[in-house]
Image (cartoon, rainbow, N blue to C red):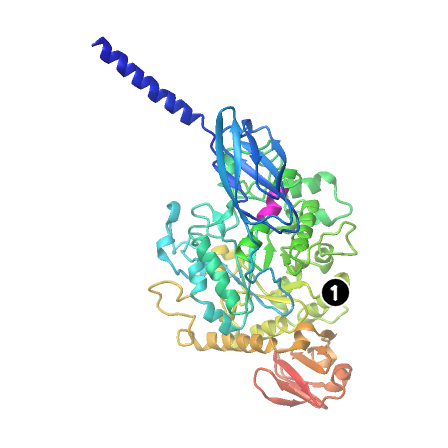
Amino acid sequence: MKTRVNILSLCLCFVGMLFCENALAIEVKRLEPTCWWVGMKNRELQLMVYGPNIAASRASINYQGVTLKNEVRVENPNYLFLYLDIAPETSPGTMDIVFTEGKKTLKYKYELKARNTKPGAQGFSTEDVLYLITPDRFANGDPSNDTAEGATVTRERPSGRHGGDIKGVTDHLDYLSDLGVTTIWLNPVQKNSANSYHGYAISDFYDVDPRFGTMEEYIDMIDKIHDRGMKVVMDMILNHCGGGHWWMQDLPTGDWLNFNNQFVPTSHLKWTVVDPHAAPSERKLFSDGWFTRGMPDLNQRNPLLSKYLIQSTIWWIEYARIDGIRQDTHPYMEPEFSSRWCKELTEEYPDFNIAGETWYPSGSGFLAWWQRNSRLNADNPNLKTVMDFNFAFLSQTAFEEPNAPEDVNPTGLFNIYVSLASDFLYEDMDNVLMFLDNHDMGRFSEVEDVGLNKYKQGIGFLLTTRGIPQIYYGTELLFKGKKKEGDGVIRKEMPGGWPGDERSVFTKQGRTDEENEAYDYMSRLLHWRKTSEAVKHGKLIQYAPVHNHGDCYVYARIKGDETVLVVMGGSDKDVEINMSRYTDVTNGFTKGVDVITGKELDITGTMKVPARGTYILELKK
C-alpha cells in the first residue's frame, strides 16, 4: 500500500513539474506587424511583441541582411518592442526570432516578403470619381458571416447590424462600373466589436472584421476592382481605437492613451487647432480628449505608438494594394504626428493620395490650413487632399433656394460662386474632395424633388467643377433621409442587396421610373466625364449669378481647344440670358452640344434657360 502511495506521489510530482515547465514557457500571443517586406525605402522595422512576461526574455536574429538594433522594454512586462534594420540586399524568406530566458527558448517564425507587384498605391485625382459605400448596408453577399463572433443582425433596427459585407460589394461591381465611377471607398472594414456596424471603433489594426468577411475576400475584391481599371480607397482611423481593442485589457504604457489612459471627452472644438489665439488648455482638450468613452484617444506623441500606427498603414498599402486613404477625424490627431504620417506614406508611395476628413462647415480657410504646403500654416501638414464640408453644407439648399444679390448675405447659387471665389486660399485647388452628402450628413435628396431639378444641378455641378468628386451610395437613386432622423436612416439598405428583397435597384427593371431617370443622368455624366480633358484638368472661369442676368450661374472648363460651358438656372421661372456677357469663354464658338440630350444650342445671341434648368455644353465652332 505504501509503495503504491509513493508511486502515485512521484507521478503527481512529475505531472506538476511538466505543468510548471509549460506554464513558465515563453509565449508570444501577438507580434505586429504580422509580416513585412524587403526592399522598403524605410529600412527600419518596429515589432510589437506581446506575451506573458515577454520583456524578461532576450531576442536574437540570425538572418542575412537583418540587424536587431534595439530592444525596448516598457513598464508593462508583457510587451517588448524590437527595432530591426533590413538592408536593401536582404532576400525574402522566413527568419527565426529567437526569444531566450534562462534555459527557456522560443523560435518565432517571421516572414519577410518580396515587394507586392500587383496594381495598387495609384492614388486618386481629378481623373477619378469616388463612390462611398457603408458595407453593412450595401449588400449581403454571404449571410453565413452575419453572426460571426457573437454578432446579431437586426435589420429592423436602423442602428443595428444588417449583414452587408465585402462579398456583397464584390457581387455588384458590374453595377458600379456600369454607373461609371472609377474608385470605390468603403467605410472601415477593419475589425470592430461584434455589434458595431459602422466600423469606426477598431479592435484590431491588422485584421478584417469577420462580419464583413475574411482578409482573402477583401484582397479578392480589390483584385477584381483593379482588374476593371478601377481603384480602392480605404477608410482609416488613427486618432482613436475602439474600447474593445485587444490591448485595452493590458495597455503597454501609462500614456498609451491620452489623459494618462483615463476618459476625458474631447470638446470637438476643431477650430482650436487652427486658431492663432486659442488657449493651450482648449487646444489640448480638443486634441487629447476622447472622441467617446467607447473610442479611447491614442497618444500619438508616444514614439512607440506613433511608429506602430504608421507601420500599420504601410502594411495595408503593401499587403492589400489599396490606392488611397480617407483619414477619419483628421484634425483630432496630434498635428506633428499627422504631418509625419502623411510624409512617410508619400515617401514610400509617391503616387499615393490621402483625403483627410476636415470637417469645417464654414469657410475655405479652415480647410486650406490643413493642405500640404499651405501658406496659412507655418508647419507643413503634408496632407494632399482636404474634404470640402463647406460646399457640402451649402449644397443642401443652394440648388433650390432663390439667389440673393451680392450686397447681402449670399444664398442659392451665389453661395456656390462665393465658395469657389475663395479658392485663392488653397495651395492646390484641384486636390479638394467635393461631395453633396456622405455617411454622416443628411441625404442630398432629403425631400421630394419635382422634376429632379435640384438633383440634376447638384450632380451636374459636382461632376464638372474643379476638384475630386465623391458620390455617396444611393445618391444616384435619390435616397432620402435627414440627419435628425438618425445615422441609420441616412445609411439605409440598397433594395435587392438581401435575399428575399421584393425588388432590386441594381437592375433597370427593379428601379422606378424616377430612379432610372436619376441613375441614367448620373451615369451619362460619369462616362462622359472620363472623356473630357477640360473637366478633368482644365481651367475654371466663372461668372457671378446676378439678377440682371436671370440669376443664372455660368462657368466654363477650358483645356486647350476644348471648352465645356455649364449654365444653371437660379430662378424658379424660365429666363433668357444674353450670351454676349460670356464671350471670355465662348468667343470663337457658335454652338454647344448638350452632353445629356445631344441637343444643339445656338450660343451667339440669347439663350432660354428653363426654371432651375441645367445645360452642360461642349462648345463647337
Going by the numbered disc 1, the residue's amino acid type is Asp
Q: Is residue 303 left or right of residue 194?
A: right
In the rendered structure, the answer to whether residue 54 lies left or right of residue 510 reads right
Judging by the rendered image, the residue that carries numbered circle 1 is: 423
Secondary structure mostly seen in magenta is helix
Label 1 sits on a secondary structure element that is: helix
The residue drawn where x is 72% and y is 52% is 381
Q: Residue furthest front?
A: 64
Instruction: From the viewer's perspective, tell me whether residue 3 is left or right of residue 546.
Output: left
Tell me residue 535's x, y (percent). 66, 75
Q: Residues within 10 Å of mark 1 (few under 14, many from 20)?
A: some
Q: Where 183 sits versus 244, above or below?
A: below
Say which quadrant the N terminus sits in.
top left
Residue 441 showing in the rendered view: no
Q: Quadrant of residue 423?
A: bottom right
In the rendering, at what x and y percent does residue 323 appear?
A: 58, 60
Residue situated in front as seen by the camera: 6 or 120: 6
Task: Report x, y in % for residue 516.
Answer: 47, 76
Q: The C terminus is located in which quarter?
A: bottom right
Q: Residue furthest left?
A: 1
Number of marks: 1
Residue 45: x, y in percent? 61, 43
Residue 485 lies in magenta, yes or no?
Answer: no
> Above or below — where is 53 with respect to 218?
above
Residue 484 seen anywhere in this rendered image of the structure: yes
Extent of the magenta region: 307-312
Q: Residue at x 70, y 49 (%)?
A: 271
